[in-house]
Every structure is written in C-alpha cells, then in structure tokens.
C-alpha cells in the first residue's frame, strides 16, 4: 500500500491512526496536540508537517473539528496543497457542510488531486474497535483508492454519490442520532419522575419497537451518570448547526432539529460542551428536577 498521511489525532483520529499502524500502513501524522503525536509516534508512525505530508504521502486523511480548519490545513500557508502533486488522494473524514466539501473538491481538482468527503459514524468505540461506518462522496476512482484503508478502520464504507454527498449523509445521521438521544432522554426523565426504575424500564422496552442502537449505547451511560465523551456535545452542537444552516439554504423546514439546536445551545451555556452527547439528558432533567440514575438496591 501507499504511504499514508493522517492529520487530526483527537478522540476519533488517534485510535483510527493506531488501527492503520496495526494494519502495517506506513503512516505519517500531524496534530497540534503534541502529546497525541508522541503517543502515535511511539506506536510506529513518523511525524511531519502539513507540507511534508502533502509532499511525501500518496493518500492523506483528515479528521478535524470543523470545515474552516480542514480548509486551512489544506489550502493555508504551508498547507497540504502547497506541496501535493497530481494523482494523489485526500479524504476528509471531518463532519462539515456539503458546501465546504465541494470547495475542497474543486480546489484540489485544479491540482489534479482527488478529494473524498467521508464522515464517519460509530463514535470513539467504533474508532477503537475498527468498526466505523464511512459515508463517502466523490469520484469512484478516489473512493476505490481509499477502500483498503476504510476496511482497516471500519466495518462498512459506501460511496453515496458525488462530492458533498458524504457530508449530506452525515448530517442526516446526526439528525437521527441526536434527536433520538433527546427523545430517549425525555422519555426516561418522565419514567424517573413517575418513580419507575429506569434500568427496568430500559430492559422492558429495548426488545420492542422502541429499541435502538442509540438506546442501547446511551441509557447504560446515563443511569451510571457517565458523561465521559465518546462523542462530545460540542461536536454535535456544531453538526446540528450545520444541519440547520444547510437545511435553511435548501428551504427544508427542520422543526425538530431546530429545537434540538436550542437544547444544545442551552447545554453550552451551562457548561456541558465536553460531556458525551448522552449528556443531552441533563437538559430534560433540569426541566423536571429529577435525575435518571440507577436505583440503589
């Protein structure tokens, strides 16, 4: 396989990079967090600047906090595009807007470089276990070049369509995930306020139509009051803002997601941005003056 660059070693990126190393990939990494860089270097990666990664790597992955940072890393002074050459492939796994993805696609196309927007779903557990789902937008040949690496880092990868369609799919994913967490939270706050044991309520309903991957992932965390982030509220706050802006630009009404954005905004004001997104329950708990937690025997 080719030499691979990997830029962004956060909650998701660091374990993804480590999985590539376990897959015997020749990996060069970069991140502003030097502690994370040193950890991945110790696992076998080399370290380079954005420009060095652009010059030396044939395939380059980015997973960064937002679209502005992705564009800066690619096209800013000393960025990847300052040294990259024709025939290479860049994959942005960040959650950004479709417009931002298309801007990156068009900017790199002028240099003869392929670009795929491929956000991921599965959170930190999926990143660690190599079971992420990749939702990609771009050209078939570039997707094909990335597929061997997707297979190392994840369990599924689908090319949705042209540039930007991966980012659109991620927005749809985030609408479903975050609104489901909110509805699950509302339901369990009601059950707890009524005096029911939330664990028993969960066990009673999880096998029926109300059961879901979100329910199974988040209720065990909520009842243990475990808000250590696998996916931070701050990231989901940004994603839902992207949902709102994108939907409005397309004249698509999104009443539930608009209300969800205000819920996330409230949690931001109250200092919960670094909580896992199961921490959305705290908004509803505040309204009802109750906590959803395990009942002591």
Image (spheres, grey):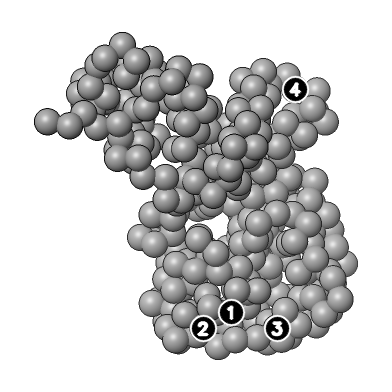
**What residue is at 45 percent from the left and 63 percent from the top?**
153
Q: Earlier in the sequence, mark 3 or mark 4?
A: 3
Of callouts 2 and 4, the N-terminal one: 2
Q: Residues within 10 Å of mark 2 (few under 14, many from 20)?
A: some
Asked which secondary structure carries label 2, the reply is helix
Query: Would you identify the image quadrant in which residue 246 lies?
Result: top right
Q: Which mark is residue 179?
A: none
- Asked if residue 131 can be seen in this view, the reply is no
What is the CA distance from the residue labelled 2 to the residue labelled 3?
14 Å
Residue 120 or 73: which is nearer the viewer? 73
Q: Which residue is mark 1?
A: 34
* Contact check, label 1 and label 3, Cβ < 8 Å: no
The reply to whether the C-beta atoms of the residues labelled 2 and 3 are less than 8 Å apart is no
Q: Position of residue 249 (x, y in %)?
A: 82, 31
Figure quadrant of the C terminus = top left
Residue 15 lies, with reference to residue 199, above or below; the image says: below
Of tags 2 and 4, the one toward the viewer is 2
> Residues under labels 2 and 1: Cα distance?
6 Å
Q: Which residue is mark 3?
A: 49
Q: Real-space Cα distance between discs 2 and 4? A: 45 Å
For the residues bearing labels 2 and 1, Cβ distance under 8 angstroms:
yes
The residue tagged 2 is 38
Q: CA distance from mark 4 to mark 1?
A: 42 Å
- The secondary element bearing badge 1 is classed as helix
Rendering coords of residue 62 (x, y %): 64, 65
Q: Residues within 10 Å of mark 1 (few under 14, many from 20)?
A: few
Mark 2 or 3, closer to the camera: 2
**Residue tagged by mark 4?**
252
């Amino acid at each position: 396989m080719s030499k691979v660059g990997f830029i962004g070693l956060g909650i998701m990126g660091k374990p993804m990079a480590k999985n590539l190393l376990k897959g015997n990939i020749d990996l060069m990494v970069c991140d502003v967090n030097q502690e994370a860089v040193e950890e991945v270097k110790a696992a076998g990666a080399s370290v380079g600047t954005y420009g060095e990664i652009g010059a030396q790597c044939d395939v380059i992955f980015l997973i960064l906090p937002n679209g502005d940072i992705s564009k800066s890393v690619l096209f800013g002074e000393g960025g990847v595009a300052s040294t990259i050459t024709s025939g290479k492939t860049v994959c942005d796994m960040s959650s950004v807007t479709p417009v931002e993805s298309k801007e990156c696609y068009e900017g790199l196309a002028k240099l003869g470089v392929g670009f795929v927007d491929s956000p991921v779903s599965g959170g930190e557990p999926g990143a660690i276990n190599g079971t992420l789902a990749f939702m990609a937008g771009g050209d078939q040949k570039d997707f094909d070049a990335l597929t061997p690496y997707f297979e190392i880092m994840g369990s599924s990868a689908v090319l949705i369509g042209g540039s930007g369609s991966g980012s659109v799919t991620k927005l749809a994913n985030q609408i479903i995930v975050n609104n489901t967490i909110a509805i699950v939270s509302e339901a369990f706050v009601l059950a707890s306020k009524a005096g029911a044991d939330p664990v028993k309520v969960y066990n009673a309903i999880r096998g029926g139509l109300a059961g879901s991957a979100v329910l199974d992932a988040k209720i065990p965390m909520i009842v243990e009051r475990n808000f250590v982030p696998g996916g931070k509220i701050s990231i989901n706050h940004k994603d839902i803002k992207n949902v709102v802006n994108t939907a409005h630009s397309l004249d698509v009404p999104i009443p539930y997601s608009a209300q969800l954005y205000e819920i996330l905004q409230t949690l931001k004001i109250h200092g919960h941005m670094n909580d896992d997104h199961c921490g959305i329950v705290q908004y509803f708990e505040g309204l009802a003056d109750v906590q959803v937690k395990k009942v002591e025997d």
